[in-house]
């Protein structure tokens, strides 16, 4: 049986170096090598990568090493925060707390108790959208942005059960050309910095999730799996 090409979307293989193994056996694989997959797997790595050049596009964040780290962050940035795992492979559900320092700290304690590596961010309101990038390491293609619907309504935080990225064919009216340019610049900057600092070329699909009112990027996804496909 001849294998013509392989696209790696399985999470463990994706972050564990399956593409590197395929490359060593000369099996074409459209997915990033293990070092490049850090753009999704290591959320703090990606934020620091871009913050060096465009700090205004990265919301305030901090790794949570202990209780005092989280308390100091909330004291400085307010009680509306987002708590998530610092790694995409962690089974720690993203939590949003609106003016609820007590609830946030309870979740921090739970996360630290189970040994999770946590990331805390300042909550930023706005409409979310996703910008995809298809790249072979040299050339990049950016399709139209897609709308995110992670929650059932604007007033309810009940999740839809998926990434919620939907494309209607046209760019949503509240997404401006400046929004899309900033999103594409952010992704290109992350790829360029990855290559410049570490000599690593990203190859595959990269999805940046943005908030349009402040043009902040809050997540990068490097797997084109059923959870993030747009319809």
Image (spheres, grey):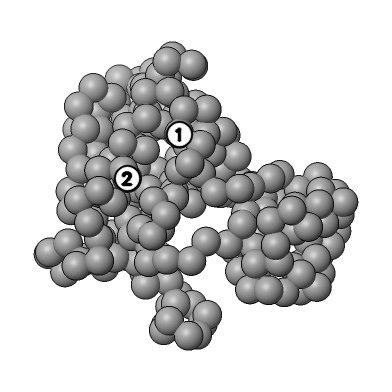
Residue in front for this viewpoint, 97 or 10: 97
Percent across and percent down for residue 99 are 68, 74
Looking at the image, tell me whether mark 2 or mark 1 is earlier in sequence order: 1
Percent position (x, y) of residue 51? 52, 34
Quadrant location of the N terminus in the rendered image: top left
Splitting the image into 4 quarters, where does residue 111 fall? bottom right
Label 1 sits on residue: 54
- 62 relative to 214, above or below: above
Q: Quick check: 109 above or below 99? A: above
Q: Which residue is mark 2?
A: 183
Choose top left, top right, bottom left or bottom right for residue 214.
bottom left
Image quadrant assignment for residue 22? top left
Q: Label 2 vs label 1: CA separation?
A: 12 Å
* Residue drawn at x 63%, y 47% as measured from the top left: 61
Query: Label 1 crowding class (10 Å Cα cut-off): few <14, some 14-19, many 20+?
Result: some
Query: Is disc 2 placed on a helix, strand or loop?
Result: helix
Q: Nearer the viewer, residue 153 or 90?
A: 153
Residues tagged 2 and 1 counted as in contact (Cβ below 8 A): no
Is 32 displayed left or right of 3 in the figure?
A: right
Identified at 84% across, 62% down, the residue is: 109
Q: Is residue 53 above or below residue 74?
A: above
């Amino acid at each position: 049986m001849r294998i013509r090409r392989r696209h790696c979307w399985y999470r463990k293989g994706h972050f564990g170096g399956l593409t590197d193994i395929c490359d060593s056996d000369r099996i074409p694989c459209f997915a990033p090598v293990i070092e490049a997959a850090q753009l999704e797997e290591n959320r703090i790595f990606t934020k620091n990568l871009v913050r060096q050049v465009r700090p205004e596009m990265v919301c305030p964040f901090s790794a949570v090493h202990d209780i005092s780290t989280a308390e100091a962050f909330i004291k400085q940035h307010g009680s509306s925060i987002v708590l998530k795992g610092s790694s995409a492979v962690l089974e720690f559900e993203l939590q949003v707390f609106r003016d609820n320092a007590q609830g946030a700290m309870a979740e921090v304690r739970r996360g630290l108790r189970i040994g999770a590596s946590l990331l805390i961010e300042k909550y930023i309101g706005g409409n979310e959208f996703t910008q995809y990038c298809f790249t072979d390491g040299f050339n990049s293609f950016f399709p139209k942005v897609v709308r995110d619907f992670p929650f059932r309504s604007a007033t309810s935080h009940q999740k839809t059960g998926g990434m919620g990225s939907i494309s209607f064919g046209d760019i949503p009216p509240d997404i401006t050309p400046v929004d899309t340019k900033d999103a594409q610049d952010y992704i290109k900057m992350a790829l360029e910095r990855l290559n410049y600092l570490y000599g690593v070329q990203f190859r595959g699909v990269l999805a940046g999730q943005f908030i349009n009112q402040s043009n902040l990027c809050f997540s990068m996804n490097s797997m084109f799996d059923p959870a993030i496909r747009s319809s």
